[in-house]
Image (cartoon, coloured by chain):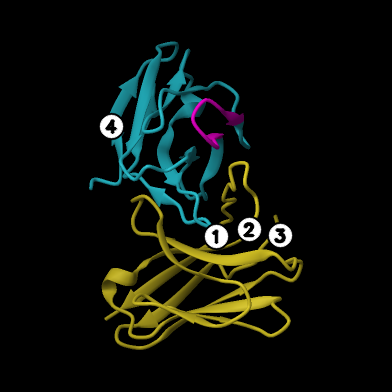
Amino acid sequence: NAGVTQTPKFQVLKTGQSMTLQCAQDMNHNSMYWYRQDPGMGLRLIYYSASEGTTDKGEVPNGYNVSRLNKREFSLRLESAAPSQTSVYFCASTGLAVPKREFFGPGTRLTVL
Amino acid sequence: DAKTTQPTSMDCAEGRAANLPCNHSTISGNEYVYWYRQIHSQGPQYIIHGLKNNETNEMASLIITEDRKSSTLILPHATLRDTAVYYCIVRDSFYNQGGKLIFGQGTELSVKP
């Protein structure tokens, strides 16, 4: 049981390049989330998926797109990377149990030059 | 979601109890109090949650005042590995569409030898 996994762990992009961050969970969770964390700040929600086939915007969705590929996988795409998107990106998931409890991945450290 | 107020930073001596306060004066009746921590840029880790009663698990204890307007997270015997940023979050347990966490700035706890 690996929990929540993210790939890649590190990435350096040039301005304007595109890339996709991958996230997968093996806990049969329904909901999945993408957060970003800038230096010295708390996490901010980018997008979330309450269940397979649905996605919704969070606090800071501009410049990102997401795909809930199946129940296990939730990807985050940067179509044209900008230096302002330099951040650490965390994926998380929760099951149906109430109250909810999030499980987080180890993060992807992205630098846009 | 109700907002929380936490001290920016705290110190604690190794082996002593660490008491982290949180104010959530606008909490509503169906909102839970959650605590997460983040160790050195790793993914946040769930610690504990509670509604009205005090709670204890293998990691910590949560004391919630009778009026529910504040709470205290207690790490009974802090170790150096407990040095982290601690986030107090309130959320609606019946938020079925995503149930997203909203992170504040948290308290940076430094456990010193």
Q: Which of marks 2 and 1 is in front?
A: 1
Residue shown at 30%/41% (left/top)?
A: A26
For disc 2, the chain is B
Task: Say which chain tag 4 marks.
Answer: A
Residue B2, disc: 3
Query: Along the polypeptide, which appears first: circle 3 or circle 2?
Result: 3
Q: Are marks 3 and 2 in contact (CB under 8 Å)?
A: no
- Compared with A33, A63 (above or below) is above
- Mark 3 vs mark 1, foreground winner is 1
Cα distance in 3D space between marks 3 and 1? 16 Å
Callouts 3 and 2 in the same chain? yes
Tag 2 residue: B91
Residue B49: give x, y in percent of width and height.
Answer: 52, 69
The local crowd at label 2, few if under 14, some if 14 to 19, many if 20 or more residues have their Cα within 10 Å, is many
The secondary structure type at the circle numbered 4 is strand
Closer to the camera: disc 3 or disc 4? Answer: 3
Label 1: chain?
Answer: A
Residue depicted at x 48% and y 50%: A40
Chain that the image shows in yellow: B
**Which residue is the site of mark 1?**
A99
Tell me if label 2 and label 4 are in contact, CB under 8 Å: no
> Residue A24 placed where, x, y %?
33, 34
Give how far apart the Cα atoms at labels 3 and 4 are. Answer: 34 Å
Q: Which amino acid does label 2 sit on?
A: Arg
Magenta span covers which residues?
Answer: A47-56
CB-based contact (under 8 Å), mark 3 and mark 4 = no
Neighbours of disc 4 within 10 Å: few (<14), some (14-19), many (20+): few
Chain A display color: cyan
Q: Name the residue under label 4.
A: A10
